[in-house]
Image (cartoon, rainbow, N blue to C red):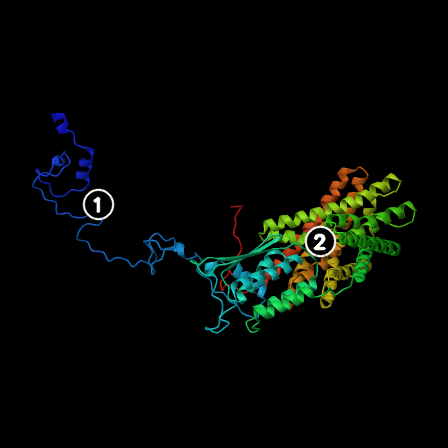
Amino acid sequence: MTDAEDRKPRSDEARSAFRQPGPVMAPAESESSTTSEFAIPEGLAAPRAGTESEATSEFALPEGLDVAPAAPAEPEGSAFSPPSTYRAREAPAAFTPPSGTPAVDLAKHVPWQDRMRTMLRMPVAERPAPEPGRAADEAGPAVPRVLDLTLRIGELLLAGGEGAEDVETAMFAVCRSYGLDRCEPNVTFTLLSISHQPSLVEDPVTASRTVRRRGTDYTRLAAVYALVDDLSDPDAHLSLEEAYRRLADIRRNRHPYPTWVLTAASGLLAGAASVLVGGDPIVFVAAAIGAMLGDRLAWLCAGRGLPEFYQFMVAAMPPAAIGVTLTLAHVDVKASAVITGGLFALLPGRALVAGVQDGLTGFYITAAARLLEVMYFFVGIVIGVLVVLYLGVQVGAKLTPDAALSIEERPLVQIAASMLLSLTFAVLLQQERSTVLAVTLNGGVAWVVYGAMHYAGGISPVASTAVAAGLVGLFGQLLSRYRFASALPYTTAAIGPLLPGSATYFGLLAIAQNEVDKGLVSLTKAVALAMAIAIGVHLGSEISRLFLRVPGALSAEGRRAAKRTRGF
């Protein structure tokens, strides 16, 4: 072996000598004992003993310092193990909300909607534990069955036109009544889902349901609210089987009004709307006949399976055709009032209010879907009326948009017409007979406020409509809180007299006469009136919750909402 080879350490032996310092091996063991500049000199004993896995680092504790080992709460590496700096008595601020955990008052004398809405807006970890409603040794119902009942109730509410926030509140109330507090309902336009997680370390149970058919029946809606109210009452002790039986009865219930009553109500609604915009008895009869013909044609299309878009298009044609026919026959009547009355029975007022309400409460996907549905219905009405108006203009019908400026002010007649319109609208919505009188008076009050502000005060129609709709929402919310029911039966029909029927008609007429600019201006006014109605109704409801007693936290944060500043 040369001197160079003798000075060159083998890599394996060198790494071994550097990694594990120990007693010096005897030189007589083998040739592998060749040392390097990193080897420990002979005669220097290293008292350190151990294995390769016990190599120290700069973070190792000094020798002689004894530290009591902490009891492991979770297996090493668990996502649920607390940080090493966590102490029970000195918890970091991040583990507690800045305002503290609120104490929630769940008294029975307040509506369950407010109680459940308060809890639903809390984080899951801050919700109070459910009140014990059964014996400790008594087994509760199966979680999948409770979730199925919850989804079926939510389906009826969403299909009946209820807002997404109110549907989520009802679903959470049903789950909580059976002890499932850690639930998260989720509502979109056609899909309902709910997830229950027993604890942080257990797998969640999730179920969903699709809403495929929608129908307006406020009697059924009121029955569902009564069921949820009984489930939320701890003194009722409603079993799961009894809840299923009542839900089946609600589904099997027939509509309170027969078909011929609905057809007559649509005619009376159109006649009352025509009088509201300046029509006489002849116009009343003509508008009623046109609306009833349109209703029958829509029922025929529905029986054939045509989509609702074509149903609206067909239903809008007979009133427009009767108005054009009266003009061609040189009958001294206001054809515009006839067509406007027919449009009042078709405008999707409730869908518009629900869409804007969902957007204002943060359900943007559902709001976009509802408003898109309203747009399709409105386009169907536009196409049906435009086809008839265009044909009428081509054959020489003298239809003048200036007739909009000649609406007569007849306060008593218009108030009576507005109340008749609200009454017939309530019948079309299949409301309970006990609510018809209240909503009729609410509609009369709305028109009185609108007339006093617009005709007598000279205020713009958009502002007058918003204030009148706000009173409708306020009174509707008060009545619903008094009866522990939904606010829809008290608000939807009452906004009927405020719907922008005349602005829609005159916009379509201007477009049919190739005056697109004037038509777009009038249609823009109709959209502004519709938005004023929707925002006014929702604002009135929120004002009632703002100033009335609201259950929840004993501090000022009883009803939490999103806090945003300038879009951040």
Q: Residue at x 78, y 59 (%)?
A: 421
Give the percent coordinates (x, y) of residue 449.
Answer: 73, 58
Height in image: 152 above or below 524?
below
Mark 2 Cα shell of 10 Å, populated few (<14), some (14-19), many (≥20): many
Q: Secondary structure at mark 2?
A: helix
Give the quarter of the figure containing the N terminus: top left
Please provide percent x and percent y for residue 95.
40, 56
**Which of the 4 image quarters holds residue 185?**
bottom right
Q: Nearer the viewer, mark 1 or mark 2?
A: 1
Compared across the picture, whether 398 is left or right of 155 comes to right
Between 477 and 54, the residue placed more toward the observer is: 54
Q: Observer-nearest residue: 20 or 379? A: 20
Side of 186 where 503 appears, left or right: right
Q: Which residue is mark 2?
A: 349
Residue 492 image point, x, y percent: 70, 58
Between discs 1 and 2, the one toward the N terminus: 1
SS category of the residue bearing label 1: helix
Type of amino acid under label 2: Gly
Whether tag 1 and tag 2 are in contact, CB under 8 A, the answer is no
Residue behind mark 1: 52
